[in-house]
Image (cartoon, rainbow, N blue to C red):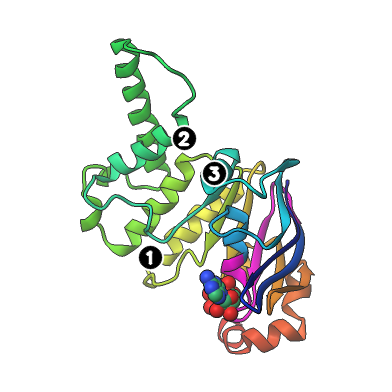
Amino acid sequence: MLQTQDLTVRFGGHVAVNAVSCSFAPGTLTAIVGPNGAGKTTFFNLVSGQIPASSGTVHLNGVDLSQAPVSARTRAGLGRAFQLTNLFPHLSVLENVRLAVQAMRSGAHWHGLNLWSIWSDHRALTERALEILHTVAMQHQQAVQVASLPHGDQRKLEVALLMALEPQVFMFDEPTAGMSHDEAPVILNLIRELKKDKRKTILLVEHKMDVVRELADRIIVLHNGTLVADGDPATVIALPVVQEAYLGVAKEAA
Ligand SMILES: Nc1ncnc2c1ncn2[C@@H]1O[C@H](COP(=O)(O)OP(=O)(O)OP(=O)(O)O)[C@@H](O)[C@H]1O
């Protein structure tokens, strides 16, 4: 269970996230919605540790991560997909995923100079990386240099890297932003697949209400940094604050 308690951040005099207390249970996909500037990305930044909170706490499974750096939060099980910033463009697709698998497993054991172990570890890393590439249907692109992949495939690879970290909590911030009409469904399918694993908690910041409606088990609404609504999708979407913020999108999606 991921829990935030009175999570707050101020930038100068501006309170971007204001005392947000919320719990996110495994087996649930929660969409975080709200108008531009509502504090959605900042809330993600506070949970993942990208920026320090002014006050409030973040706990995962009862462990206080409030003061922990990003790396410790990632190891604890908080996984955030970044828009392309985590990719090594000059390495191949397989090398990128293998590095993520290796990062996840590093520190787990130490073999000294046992060359057999190093070799068999390398093989195990490659096998795991290929397994993940298979899940995202990119195994045929394993040798391709990341820089030459189409944008949609780079975004898919981002999800693959996140999967390699085997997080308990998956955080997606507008995962289909900038994607073409053909590319977006691929990412949404991956999220649909992840949802089937009831041990996972998924947080999704998404502007497209048709996507939210389809994927979310629960919606929370941020407005001026404050949590103003929390509930099942049908109830929350019907609220005036959501209708106002998304009227255009909602009409389009209807
Ligand atoms: N590092 C920062 N320094 C100062 N102000 C910031 C910083 N990061 C965010 N803000 C401000 O905090 C508020 C919340 O921004 P945030 O990006 O979290 O909103 P959002 O809901 O994700 O918006 P969008 O839907 O447009 O992505 C905005 O007013 C923004 O200008």
Relative to 231, residue 118 above or below: above
- Mark 2 and mark 3: span between their CA atoms? 9 Å
Image vertical order of residue 175 relative to residue 248, above or below = above
The residue that mark 3 highlights is: 74
**Which residue is disc 1 drawn over?**
183
Residue type at tag 2: Met
Q: Nearer the viewer, residue 120 or 182?
A: 120
Residue 40 horizontal/vertical position (percent): 61, 70
User: Which element type, helix, strand or loop, lies under badge 1?
Assistant: loop
CB of mark 3 within 8 Å of CB of mark 1?
A: no
Q: Position of residue 51 (x, y in %)?
A: 56, 60
Which residue is label 2 attached to? 104
Q: Residue at x 72, y 68 (%)?
A: 220
- Is 143 left or right of 33, judged from the image as shown? left
Residue 189 image point, x, y percent = 49, 56
Task: State ligand 1's quadrant.
Answer: bottom right
Identified at 43% across, 59% down, the residue is 186
Does residue 163 sit above or below 31 in this rendering?
above
Q: Quadrant of residue 29?
A: bottom right
Q: Amino acid at mark 3?
A: Thr
Q: Secondary structure at mark 3?
A: helix
Q: Is residue 35 magenta?
A: yes
**Residue 161 visible in the picture:** yes
The span shown in magenta is 23-42
Look at label 1 and name its amino acid.
Answer: Glu
Q: At 61% from the left edge and 47% from the top edge, which residue is drawn?
A: 196
